[in-house]
Structures are given as structure tokens and as C-alpha cells.
Amino acid sequence: MAEGTGGSMWMPLAGKIIDAGLAKNVLLVSIGVGGSPIERWAPTGDLSQHLESNLELLNKLQIPVSMFLWHQGSSDIGKPADAYLSHFLSINKTIRSKGYTSPVLVALHSRCSGYYDKGIEAAQKALAQRYQDGLFLGANTNLLDESYRFDGCHLNANGQEQAAQRHAALLAAREVLDVRLPRRQAKRVGGDLEL
């Protein structure tokens, strides 16, 4: 879960990045808020200040950010895809306004409690095609069915491990961005990377 109360994929991902030799050290800064729809993070939302103050703190402490990992969307099931797209672009604009040029990996995440919103997923895929805005495709956690979720929505330990593996494979294959990582092979299935 975003706050880490049910575990998360981020610690396993850090371990996989180190184990693969992609980095010697990984510092994770999680600012997620569970159950938050995207409009809360947009400039007019109540979490916008939370985002901005954390970005400013990282700048103040001179902590470099290699990438942003965006894993959000299940709270937006049933909402218009174009609104999701618009809100996310405004969030990305906030990130860029603070001086960050680091890539943003947008996970495909629109599955919860038996619902699977292909419209939100399409918006997330469209965002990941906006390379000029620093946006790239992250892990597809929609592929993880109910057996990988402890409550039908949030990932259980197995799901967290699988999501971490998917992110790590994308980074190792450099399918997502150019961050001076060693090139590895990955198999394409249709338009998606098989992990």
C-alpha cells in the first residue's frame, strides 16, 4: 500500500536494482497516499502541496532524483480517461517546474476489486508515449490477477515481488529510458515487454 502498512513493491525493487548491478545504492522516497484519485495530486488538489513540499525538500537537501515511479490509477476506475491524462500532465508540469528533468515511469495500474478500467490503462499508455515530456512506460501491474492481491486491489507479498520484478526488468533492459544502465535483452510480446 502507498503508506507501506501492507508492504510495498519498492523495497524489493531497490534490492533487485542493486542485485542486477544497476546501482550500488538506492534511496527511495515514497510520498504516496493510499486510495488517492489523481485529481488530488493535480495543482488544485489537496495533495499538490504534499507533492511540491517533498520536491522542494529533495532540492534543499541536494538529493538527486534518478527517476520518479508513478503507480496510481485504481482509485480512478470509472472516471474519464481524458481527465486522467489532463490531471497527470499538470502533475508532470509541477515536477518539471521544480527543476526536475528525471524520467517519470508510469505504471499501468487500473485494476481493483474485480474491476479493470481499460480507459484509465489507455490513458496511462498514452502518457508513456510522451517521451518529450520525460514520461515512459512502467510496470504493467494490471496483469497481476486477484491471486496477487490481498484485498482484491492492493498487492500481496507475491504481487509486490512480481511488480518489483517487472519494474526491474524494464530498467535492466533499458526499454524505458536512457540512464546509463547496461543493455539487457527483453522479449516483446505485442506492444508490451514480457517480464
Image (cartoon, grey):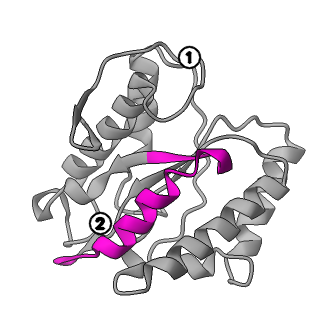
Please say whether residue 121 is one of the residues in the magenta stretch.
yes
Place of residue 79 in the rendered image (x, y in percent of width and height, measured from the top left): 41, 86
Circle 1 crowding by C-alpha within 10 Å: few under 14, some 14–19, many from 20? few
Q: Secondary structure at mark 1?
A: loop
Looking at the image, residue 76 sits to the left or right of residue 47; the answer is left
Circle 2 crowding by C-alpha within 10 Å: few under 14, some 14–19, many from 20? many
Q: Compared with residue 160, is residue 186 higher up or lower down, i.e. above or below?
A: above
Residue range in magenta is 113-137
Q: Nearer the viewer, residue 123 or 54?
A: 123
Name the image quarter holding the N terminus: bottom left
Q: Nearer the viewer, residue 37 or 122?
A: 122
Q: Nearer the viewer, residue 156 or 162?
A: 162
Please report the residue visible at 57 percent of the width from the left and 30 percent of the height from the top: 26
Q: Which residue is mark 1?
A: 24
Q: Residue 38: which quarter of the image?
A: bottom right
Q: Which residue is mark 2?
A: 154
For the residues labelled 2 and 1, the Cα–Cα distance comes to 29 Å
Place of residue 42 in the rendered image (x, y in percent of width and height, measured from the top left): 67, 76
Please report the residue visible at 75 percent of the width from the left and 42 percent of the height from the top: 101
Q: Earlier in the sequence, mark 2 or mark 1?
A: 1
Q: Residue 155: which quarter of the image?
A: bottom left
Name the image quarter holding the C terminus: top left
Q: Compared with residue 158, is residue 176 higher up or lower down, i.e. above or below?
A: above
Looking at the image, residue 184 sits to the left or right of residue 3; the answer is left
Question: Is residue 36 something that shows in the picture?
Answer: no
All told, the count of numbered labels is 2
> What amino acid is labelled 2 in the image?
His
Q: Compared with residue 156, is residue 164 higher up or lower down, i.e. above or below?
A: above
Please say whether residue 12 is one of the residues in the magenta stretch.
no
Q: Residue 51: which quarter of the image?
A: bottom right
